[in-house]
């Protein structure tokens, strides 16, 4: 019996271009029939944050919450220029018919990609499960990711 090939991706970056790459690879792998999981840690968790929420309870958590955007607020790794770069890239992509990051995330959900938030990162950054989109899996630790990656045919760190 042939087992499905597996793809495991760590999403560490909160940069728009890197999250695009992660979701494009994940949706492509899933569309090709691969069992695909994404492990979101630290700034990568922005891809799973509900729109418009501020996170954090303590002083430092609230400070991070102020900087912690949702998937629509993330900017490119280069040439962000205080948000102008984000606007410019979104416009250029729309003009070229490129799927938005929000749409890519929904495609990943529709294709059954497992979206796993990092429990430790959430605790440190004072992010709760309720702060994340409903489709996010329950938070997991690094050991769960390593077990998943150990069985994967493709493992990526973005």
Image (spheres, helix red, strand yellow):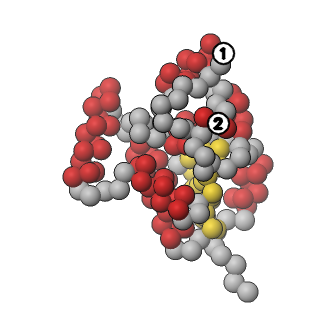
Of discs 1 and 2, which sits in the foreground? 2
- The residue that appears at 42% across and 36% down in the rendered structure is 74
Q: Looking at the picture, how far across and down is residue 85, in whole percent?
A: 29, 35
Q: How many marks?
A: 2
In terms of secondary structure, where does tag 2 sit? helix
Q: Looking at the picture, how far across and down is residue 71, in whole percent?
A: 46, 41
User: Up-down: is 70 above or below 22?
Assistant: above
- The residue that appears at 68% across and 42% down in the rendered structure is 118
In terms of secondary structure, where does tag 1 sit? loop
Q: Looking at the picture, how far across and down is residue 47, in whole percent?
A: 51, 43
User: Up-down: is 114 above or below 3?
Assistant: above
Q: Looking at the picture, how far across and down is residue 27, in whole percent?
A: 49, 63
Disc number at residue 58? 1
The answer to which of marks 1 and 2 sits earlier in the sequence is 1
Tell me: 39 left or right of 94: right
The quarter of the rendered structure image containing the N terminus is: bottom right
Kindly identify which residue carries mark 2.
130
Instruction: Find the residue positioned furthest to the top.
Output: 59
Q: Is residue 44 visible?
A: no
User: Up-down: is 8 above or below 122?
Assistant: below
Please tell me how crowded label 1 is: few (under 14), some (14-19), or many (20+) other residues with Cα within 10 Å: few
Quadrant of residue 15 within the rendered picture? top left
């Amino acid at each position: 019996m042939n087992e499905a090939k597996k793809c495991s991706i760590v999403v560490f970056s909160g940069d728009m271009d890197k999250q695009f790459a992660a979701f494009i690879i994940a949706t492509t792998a899933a569309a090709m029939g691969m069992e695909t999981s994404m492990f979101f840690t630290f700034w990568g968790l922005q891809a799973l944050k509900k729109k418009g929420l501020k996170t954090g309870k303590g002083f430092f958590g609230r400070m991070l919450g102020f900087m912690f955007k949702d998937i629509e607020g993330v900017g490119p790794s280069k040439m962000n220029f205080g948000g102008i770069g984000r606007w410019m890239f979104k416009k250029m992509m729309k003009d070229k018919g490129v799927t938005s990051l929000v749409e890519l995330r929904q495609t990943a959900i529709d294709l059954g990609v497992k979206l796993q938030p990092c429990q430790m990162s959430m605790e440190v950054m004072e992010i709760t499960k309720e702060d994340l989109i409903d489709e996010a899996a329950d938070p997991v630790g690094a050991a769960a990711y390593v077990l998943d990656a150990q069985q994967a045919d493709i493992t990526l760190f973005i």
